[in-house]
Each structure stands twice: as structure tokens, then as C-alpha cells.
Amino acid sequence: MTTIEKSLQKSQYRIFINASCEKAWHCTFDLPSYEKWTSAFAEGSTVETDWQEGSEAVFKGNEGHGMVGRIAKSQPHSFLSIEHLGQLKDGEKIFSGDDIESWSGAKENYTFTEKDGGTELLIEMDVAEKYKDMFDEMWPRALEKLKALAEA
């Protein structure tokens, strides 16, 4: 077992969206809807990526801080996995340091499943224990915003 596996735990968040997997996918990852639902984590959130497997993904707030990852797996309208690799501080990408190494390699997975004429969205995320309560509070709010966008 690696250090990462020991220090991270998997959290799950799910929601039913009364829309097709395709529409739920696009509302999840296309700008500007991505920016609307992720405001539950930080106002001004955005992302720079093409969501293609192997591509870099830079997640940032309006102060130039955020996270850097890569798209580990992408199966449009079905599954997307993001591997977190580093931080963004004042626009600079940082990939080393104790704080980063404690969660580098963590995955954030999105699974879209057709169910009852709509979509069940399951988020599975590797989370450091010190951030678990924060994400347990933020994810449900974010998913309610996403649901409203996809069902509009």
C-alpha cells in the first residue's frame, strides 16, 4: 500500500438528474454551466482543459489559485476520471511539497448511468481526512446546482 492509499479515503456523492446522460455530461463539463455549479466550491471557479484522456486540467478560482490534474480516463456521456497532480498558486503550477504529496494521485471520478428515464450521477473522490467534512458539505450543494442546470 502506498502512502497515498493510506492517507486518503474514498467519499461518494450521488444525485438523480431528470435528463439524459448526454445532457447531464455537457452540463457537468461544458463552460459556462461548469462554472455555475462549481461556484458551490469557490466563486469564480473555472477550468482549462479539453476533457480528453491524457490532457492537462487546470482548475482555478478568481484569485489564481487552484489545482492541476490530468484526465486519466474519458468515456463521453459515461465516465470521466481526473487525477490530481499539483497546485496552482498565483498562476504557477507546483508539483512537489509535503502538502501536495499527501494527496497527489488522488482521483475524482464521475460516473453517468442511465436510470428511470434520467441519469444517476455518482462522484467518487479520494479525500484527505482533514478535507472530508468540507467536501461532505460542498458536494451536495454543487450537485443540486448541477441538477437544476441540467433539468432546466
Image (cartoon, rainbow, N blue to C red):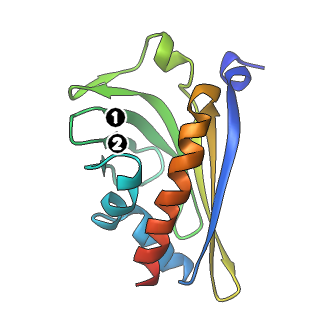
Q: Is residue 145 above or below residue 152?
A: above
Name the disc covering residue 137, or none: none
Residue 38 appears in which quarter of the rendering?
Answer: bottom left
Which of the pair 63/72 is nearer the observer? 63
Q: Which residue is mark 2?
A: 59
Q: Residue at x 22, y 34 (%)?
A: 64
Residue 50 appears in which quarter of the rendering?
Answer: bottom left
| Residue type (three-letter) at the residue carrying disc 2 | Phe
Q: CA distance from mark 2 to mark 1?
A: 5 Å
Point out residue 148 in the picture as x, y percentages from the top left corner.
Answer: 44, 76
Q: Which residue is mark 1?
A: 66
Q: Is residue 45 above or below residue 140?
A: above
Q: Is residue 73 left or right of residue 30?
A: right
Q: Element type at marker 1?
A: strand
Q: Element type at marker 2?
A: strand
| Residue type (three-letter) at the residue carrying disc 1 | Gly
Residue furthest right as drawn: 1
Res. 73 in view: no
Q: Is residue 39 above or below residue 21?
A: above
Q: Residues within 10 Å of mark 2 (few under 14, many from 20)?
A: some
Q: Residue at x 21, y 25 (%)?
A: 90
Q: Earlier in the sequence, mark 2 or mark 1?
A: 2
